[in-house]
Amino acid sequence: MRSATIKELLSSKNLLQEITIKGWVRTFRSNRFIALNDGSTLNTIQCVVDFENFDEELLKKVNTGAALKITGTLVESQGKGQSVEIQVSALEVLGIADPEEYPIQPKKHSLEFLREKAHLRIRTNTFAAIMRVRSTLSFAIHNYFRENGFNYFHAPIITGSDAEGAGEMFRVTTLDEKNPPLTEDGAVDYKQDFFGKETNLTVSGQLEAEAYAMALGKVYTFGPTFRAENSNTSRHLAEFWMIEPEMAFFDLDANMDLAEDFIKNVISYTLTHCQEDLEFLEKRLLDEEKSKPQAQRSDMPLIEKLKFVVDNNFKRVSYTEAIDILKNCKPNKKKQFKYPIEEWGTDLQSEHERYLVEKHFNCPVILFDYPAKIKAFYMRLNEDGKTVRAMDILFPGIGEIVGGSQREERLDILKEKIKELGIDEKELWWYLDLRKFGTAEHSGFGLGFERLVLFATGMGNIRDVIPFPRTPQNAEF
Ligand code: ATP
Ligand code: MG
Ligand code: MG
Ligand code: MG
């Protein structure tokens, strides 16, 4: 048994106690000082070995990356920066790490290199810090919803409806490749994918969450979602986690209020509970920034940026107002937007979103009331007949972090919309039932968890904030 984590020992006042710890070697200096880490904290504990008392062959195995069991006495540290250290009395090498082969040696590794070692990169301080922040954020999310009267609902991963996913879905199939069922024209009948029914991996749990909200009031899902995005951006994954609250009797304003309060709350929780890791990530970023030209440097250190989000109101701007701003602005001294805004009704590109957030308003922005034509079928039509009660939350350095809306609760209007889009009503029979039986105003949103982790850690690429990223051709681990 291990008596305590390194995190606990480092703040322990119980000097002279005999303890046993297990962990991995970060460094072994002068055949005397082992820096041991066990993942409980960013820090290592110094374990002092009197090498005269230990077998030479044994000490040769104490290399970076090796797993050790150490027994010793906790004493006051002679070294700087740490209050305690361990005077080692017994040492066992549980697992060696050959220095010729172990890739995570104590030197600076590029993030690209580490992506190829996704199973070992977590042993670096950077990735351990990111993943502890990620873990803390997930608990903060569950806490927030629990404290605010939500029920945690588990949306299915395999779904039968593809109304939402237009072209972005992964098919789930049980078809016998050698002897597949055929359509009348002799083609493979994918409609029979799942023992006779067409099925896909979910792109969002929203439609199902609506059913649950219309019975339990306030619900949320927090699970993996899948999109067959064949693109390589720093913001998109093929498998990502989404947080999707759905609330009965909420209009769009209440939805925006909740989303803003939610984001502030979980970031604030993380500021309190991950101080050490955030300080480390901030310092790492500052070092990185030094090598960049002045103009590309971020104007705010990480922690200040997080505090700014917690302490300031998000700017709420209608799509129409945003278009006016974008039509009349000069995004850059030299060039126009790559896609200049020609008219009301066009979808915004990330360059437009970034301009609004990073140049014009300089704070998180909630854009709302989008043209119906560029948004999904289920969004609540406004009285003007051409905009819908949709909202996107845009974050500095990230772009879209949330997409949400008030849902269309009126059966006739929803049916009309479905028909217009050529969707088969039969596929959505159960969704339409929700409007037939006890329909009411309701709203919700989807927040991409990895985009939130990106923001909270200051990292630049979404591949670095999820344990084993799934991007095109990247599913080795
Ligand atoms: P984007 O415009 O960035 O492609 P989207 O509008 O397609 O996003 P939504 O369908 O609105 O995305 O999904 C809700 C949220 O899920 C987004 O606001 C974003 O935070 C996140 N998200 C969407 N697609 C991805 C993806 N491929 N990888 C990671 N997160 C994603
Ligand atoms: Mg998308
Ligand atoms: Mg979008
Ligand atoms: Mg969206």
Image (cartoon, helix red, strand yellow):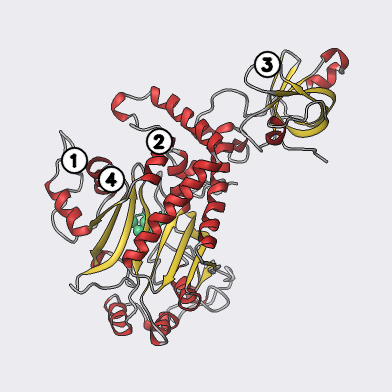
Q: Earlier in the sequence, mark 3 or mark 4?
A: 3
Q: Is residue 419 visible?
A: yes
Q: Earlier in the sequence, mark 3 or mark 1?
A: 3
Callout 1: helix, strand or loop? Answer: loop
Horizontal and vertical percent for residue 317?
Answer: 24, 55
Q: Give the Cα separation between the discs numbered 4 and 1.
A: 12 Å
Q: Which residue is mark 1?
A: 331
Q: Which residue is mark 4?
A: 357
Judge the density around disc 2: few (<14), some (14-19), many (≥20) Cα neighbours within 10 Å: few
Of residues 411 and 334, the one drawn nearer to the viewer in this rendering? 411
Of residues 284 and 259, the one drawn nearer to the viewer in this rendering? 259
Of residues 13 and 1, the one drawn nearer to the viewer in this rendering? 13
Judge the density around disc 3: few (<14), some (14-19), many (≥20) Cα neighbours within 10 Å: few
Callout 4: helix, strand or loop? Answer: helix
Of residues 61 and 45, the one drawn nearer to the viewer in this rendering? 45
Q: Amino acid at mark 3?
A: Gly
Horizontal and vertical percent for residue 53?
Answer: 88, 15
Label 4–label 1 contact, CB within 8 A: no
Q: Earlier in the sequence, mark 2 or mark 4?
A: 2
Q: Which residue is mark 2?
A: 304
